[in-house]
Image (cartoon, grey):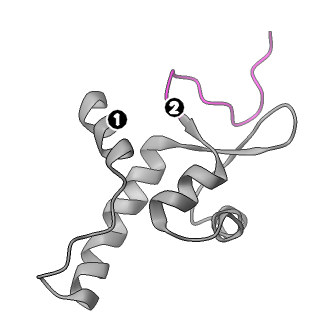
C-alpha cells in the first residue's frame, strides 16, 4: 500500500480537530484555521478529514503555556489536558 502524502510514518497517535480543540479549549474550527495558516500541520485521511500529530500538538501547547502564565500570573494553573500529558510521559 502506498503511503498517503503527509501520512505519519511512525505509530504516533493522530488527534482529531475536536481532540485538539478540547486540549486548547477552543472551537474545532479554530484548530482548522491554525492548520490553514500553518500554525499547526495537519494530515489528511483518505476520506479528506484532518488529523494532527500528538507531538506537534503537545509542542504547541508547551509553547503557549509560558505566554499564558505571564498573562494570568504565577498563581494560576496552566491549561492542560491530563490525557495528553499521560501520553507525553509514556512517549518520553
At x 71%, y 68%, the residue is 29
Measuring from the top left, give residue 63's x and y in whole percent.
Answer: 34, 66
* Relative to 5, 19 lies left or right: left
Rendered-image quadrant of the N terminus: top right
Q: Are marks 1 and 2 in contact (CB under 8 Å)?
A: yes
Q: Does 53 appear in magenta? A: no
> What is the secondary structure assignment of the residue under circle 1?
helix
Graded by Cα atoms within 10 Å as few (under 14), some (14 to 19) or many (20 or more), the crowding at tag 2 reads: few
Which circle marks residue 87 in the picture?
1
Taking the magenta stretch, the answer to whether it contains residue 6 is yes
Quadrant in the rendering for residue 44: top right
What residue occupies the far right of the structure in this picture? 47
Q: Residues within 10 Å of mark 1 (few under 14, many from 20)?
A: some
Tell me the chief SS of the magenta region.
loop
Position of 60 relative to 19 (above/below): below
Residues rendered magenta in the picture: 1-13
If you read the primary sequence from the N terminus, does the residue marked by circle 1 or circle 2 appear first?
Answer: 2
**Quadrant of residue 34 within the rendered picture:** bottom right
> Which label was assigned to residue 13?
2
Is 49 located above or below residue 24 in the figure? above
Image quadrant for the C terminus? top left
Report x, y in % for residue 24.
Answer: 47, 65
In front: 18, or 63? 18
Amino acid at each position: 500500500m502506498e503511503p498517503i502524502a503527509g501520512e505519519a510514518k511512525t505509530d504516533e497517535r493522530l488527534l482529531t480537530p475536536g481532540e485538539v480543540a478540547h486540549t486548547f479549549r477552543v472551537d474545532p474550527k479554530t484548530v482548522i484555521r491554525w492548520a490553514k495558516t500553518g500554525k499547526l500541520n495537519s494530515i489528511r485521511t483518505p476520506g479528506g478529514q484532518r488529523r494532527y500529530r500528538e507531538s506537534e500538538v503537545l509542542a504547541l501547547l508547551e509553547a503557549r503555556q509560558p505566554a499564558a502564565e505571564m498573562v494570568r500570573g504565577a498563581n494560576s494553573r496552566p491549561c492542560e489536558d491530563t490525557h495528553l500529558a499521560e501520553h507525553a510521559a509514556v512517549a518520553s
